[in-house]
Amino acid sequence: MAIADELQRIGAPVRRWARTQRREYTNGEERPLAGDLGAMGVYVGLVSTAAAAVRASGRQLPDRIPVGDALLLTVATFRLARRIAKDPVTAPIRAPFTRFEGASGHAEVAEEVREHGGVKHAVGELVTCPFCLAQWVGTGFVFGYVTAPKATRLAALTMTMIAGSDVLQFVYDGIQNGGLAPRSEGVDEAE
């Protein structure tokens, strides 16, 4: 019991400091600071575990990554993060944390975080934010590239091809709808 009491005594100022920071930061809004801290802890834990596994396997890290591979992984990270965060097909992954709000552009949905404050809020913000997910997806691609470069290149190629196809779909749609037709000079926009 003496150890538990001592930990309580030592931890009390830290808990007070954390409550003060939360109160001053949130400005009365529900913000999932503890959930965000938990998500960061999970990320650091996963990266540390993966790094330890790579080290234990004896694999050597590449001295540098060829520009072509870096571009491939970058586009794939963009496409996969957006797919997870916005695609209607991946809605079941987000559903426990979000609420459907409606369509949001071509083949994307708008969703809101279902619960405010706490872990579900933090996860909801993460899974609906392609910018936030890119960190996780990119890290996965990097560890994949180090441990299984050929398979990772194939997976990245698939997502990069989909991103290219998306661009072509928008171009085609623009052509079909006259959005890419040349404008006549001298035509008044108000007519």
Image (cartoon, helix red, strand yellow):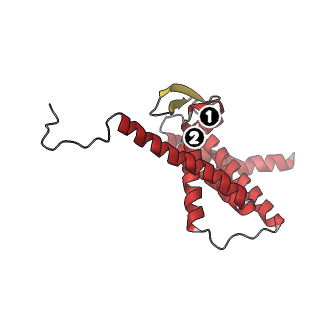
**The C terminus lies in quadrant:** top left
Is residue 182 positioned above or below 97 on the image?
below
Q: What numbered label is drawn on residue 30?
A: none
Name the residue located 41 percent from the left edge and 42 percent from the top edge: 171
Q: Amino acid at mark 1?
A: Thr
Determine the secondary structure under disc 2.
Answer: helix
Q: Amino acid at mark 2?
A: Arg
Is residue 113 positioned above or below 163 on the image?
above
Place of residue 131 in the rendered image (x, y in percent of width and height, measured from the top left): 52, 47
Which image quarter: residue 54?
bottom right
Question: Badges 2 and 1: C-beta atoms under 8 Å apart?
Answer: yes
Kindly identify which residue carries mark 1: 90
- Return the residue found at the far bottom: 63
Residue 125 horizontal side relative to residue 104, left or right: right
Place of residue 92 in the rendered image (x, y in percent of width and height, measured from the top left): 65, 30
The front one of 109 and 188 is 188
Place of residue 88 in the rendered image (x, y in percent of width and height, measured from the top left): 57, 31
Name the residue located 49 percent from the left edge and 43 percent from the top edge: 166
The front one of 24 and 178 is 178
Kindly identify which residue carries mark 2: 83
Q: Considering only order in the chain, which callout, 1 or 2, is on the residue closer to the N terminus?
A: 2
